[in-house]
Amino acid sequence: MKRRPKILYIQKPPGGGSVVALYDMVKVLDKEKFEPVILCYELNRYTQVFNELGVKTIFLNVKKKSGNGTAAKQKNPYRIFAPFRKLKRLIIDDRRKSRQIASIIKENKIDLIHHNNDINESRQAILANRKTRLPQICHYRSLKPYQKDPFNYSVDYFMAKNVNHHIFISHAVAKHFTKNLKIKKHKGVVIRDIIDVKKFKPQVRNVAIQLELGLQDADIIISNIGRISRWKGQHIFIKALAELVKEYPEVKALVVGPSEPGVGDPIYFNELQKLTEDLQLNHHVIFTGNREDIPAILSVTDIVVHSSIEPEPQGLVIVEALFYGKPVIVSDAGGSAELIVNNQGGLKVPPGNPSELAKAMVQLIKCHLKEAVYLNATNRPLILSEFNPGRQIKSIEDIYTSLLNL
């Protein structure tokens, strides 16, 4: 019997949407044709879900960041030394880790490497492949700025030359990296993140969640779902709520997402709590922490707000909300803006503008329920066509087949 090609999926960040996307991608992979092996940098409650897939999963012994993640910046405040610290990380730290990854590649007889993150996050693994020269794919999930970072730009530019194919999760991400890293168009393709669409079907309100969070049937529930990080703009959402509750005191807001170091930002979370108190919104805002039951959260939600203040690569929760039939409000920038076409499915607002966000929330609240449902229904064919797991995984498998000359 012919051996199945082994695909090594490498996941560096310890949490976030890339972990979820990788889980859903490997879950639908044709395992009779390809044998997946997963390599995660950290073992935590987010990455240990891969054990559920019955797929060989390897975890690197990486020390966790201590404190709030700002220690490295405080260690040496002089900017003049920044390039030297970056060079040390590349020459010493990255090479040390790359040797460890190279051993894993060799021991597991890998045939193709699928970096599940951008070039910047994949340097160590790309270096690890410099001797074996296996075909490799880079999966871009961010809009990393390079304007003020010539060192990292130069490194990423040359690293990208070693990658055989590039997958972008949105057209905004494709345009950004194709232009910056001079990636040839025939070497890149836009494939949206694969999600388990069966999880996100309209259903009645989850009574258990209502009771747990103390929600009433008469409440207007607005949810902001995403890891607690400043660029996600939860502070903009809370400021907009301060304007909204003057007109609609029955509004309750759910701020859903993790805030622990490495995934979220605990300092920013404390700022959000203080802002909520200062604006006298304690009665209106509920911080739920990280939730594994997002479909249940969506079932009690009337409107979903995605308030990022920087261009969003895609916004997985936006897609999930649209599948669930919930009207959404997104920042009009990056990949998230691509998901709302002609106000079908929701509304777009300027990033970082609490007043405009408040106006958009008022507009959706004033919509009759039937109108709000229709708002989403008109966008559903577009979402269904772009987020079709069978079609998406087939596109990825075709890339594997081509690179492996099968």
Image (cartoon, rainbow, N blue to C red):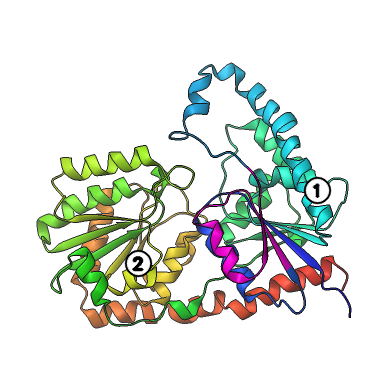
Is 348 placed left or right of 282 in the picture?
right
Position of residue 286 measured from the top left corner of the image (x, y, whole percent): 23, 56
Question: In the rendering, at what x and y percent does residue 292 appear?
Answer: 41, 65
Q: In which quarter of the image is residue 140?
A: bottom right
Could you tell me which secondary element the residue under label 2 belongs to?
strand
- Tag 2 near tag 1, CB within 8 Å: no
**Residue 207 belongs to magenta span:** no
- Number of dots carrying numbers: 2
Name the one closer to the observer, 295 or 53. 53
Q: Which residue, given by chain and number where applicable, does mark 1 sit on? A: 103
- As drawn, 33 above or below 11: below
Q: How far apart are marks 2 and 1 (CA)?
A: 46 Å
Tell me if residue 385 comes above or below residue 362 in the rendering. Answer: below
Asked whether, in this view, residue 377 is left or right of residue 188, the answer is: left
Q: Quadrant of the C terminus?
A: bottom right
Q: Earlier in the sequence, mark 2 or mark 1?
A: 1
Image quarter of residue 164: bottom right
In front here: 335 or 45?
Answer: 45
* Residue 213 relative to residue 325: left or right: left
Label 1 Cα crowd, 10 Å radius (few <14 / some 14-19 / many 20+): few
Residue indicated by mark 2: 328
Please name the residue shown 70% across and 78% down the image. Answer: 30
Name the residue at 35% across, 40% down. Answer: 268
Q: Which residue is drawn at 64% across and 24% down?
A: 85
Q: Residues within 10 Å of mark 2 (few under 14, many from 20)?
A: many
Name which quarter of the figure residue 346 lies in. bottom left
Under circle 1, the secondary element is helix
Q: Name the amino acid, label 1.
A: Ser
Identity of the residue drawn at 53% across and 27% down: 72
Q: Is residue 49 magenta?
A: yes
Q: Which amino acid does label 2 sit on?
A: Val
The span picked out in magenta is: 36-61
